[in-house]
Image (cartoon, rainbow, N blue to C red):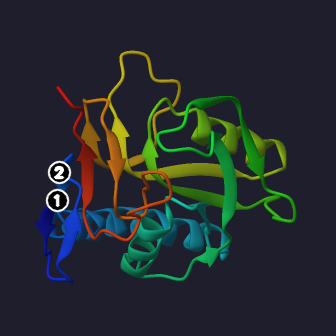
Amino acid sequence: MSKLNESGPARQLPPSFALQYSAKQISARVRELGEEVGRWCARVWDESHTDVMVIPVLRGGVFFFADLVREIPGSVEIVPIRTEAYEASARGAPRPQVAVHSEGIAVKGRVVLIVDDVCDSGRTLEALERDLTARGAREVRSVVLIRRLLNHPTFVPCWVGFEHSGNEWFVGYGMDDGQRWRNLPGVHVIKREA
């Protein structure tokens, strides 16, 4: 087990975990994203006198979401949503279709920002945007902490924190490995055994 202390408690991590983005790197990038997204939110308010509806994707996106909205200078409305894109197992296989649980969210005529942790293929964000638009959202944009660079992406978010070209599994800062290690302050990749 490797030790980690990013200005928090010392942790015994599995030796296969390699730090990809430190808490300091994430904090700096989230601050920049908050400024960029905040300017857009201010324009929406000026044009409509309505707050942007910010929808964090549960559960992986909550850490990024919480830090991001605190960096947005103006008011936003917060409405969480849950999706299911992977089977409930460690490093689960993708589901054939993304399940969106948006019942009870009044999006008609609203401007919406989806916040998620990772954009791999883009299936989840694409399904969410399609669902919210079909239910009457006036505009839907998205922001993710990490976008995996693929040859043929199905969806590209409006704002991206980091771009990653590998196919390693991410863990920490809200992302899990079999429902474990979401509480790490940085993002790690799990190195494959040789």
Q: Give the vertical position of 81 relative to 191 (above or below).
A: below
| Number of the label disc, if any, that sits on residue 125 | none
Residue 27, percent across and down? 23, 70
Give left or right: position of 55 versus 32.
Answer: right
Is residue 37 toward the left or the right of residue 80 in the image? left
Quarter of the image where the N terminus is located: bottom left
Residue 160 in sight in this render: no
Q: Quadrant of the C terminus?
A: top left
Q: Amino acid at mark 2?
A: Pro
> Whole-percent x and y of residue 98?
70, 37
Q: Is residue 67 above or below residue 178?
A: below
* Residue under numbered circle 1: 1
Where residue 55 appears, as percent x and y from the top left, is 62, 63
Q: Position of residue 163 (x, y in %)?
A: 27, 40
Tags 2 and 1 touching, CB below 8 Å: yes
Which residue shows up at 36% across the image and 23% down it?
150
In this view, 135 is above or below 92: below
Q: Given the image, on which type of amino acid does mark 1 rest? A: Met
Residue underneath mark 2: 15
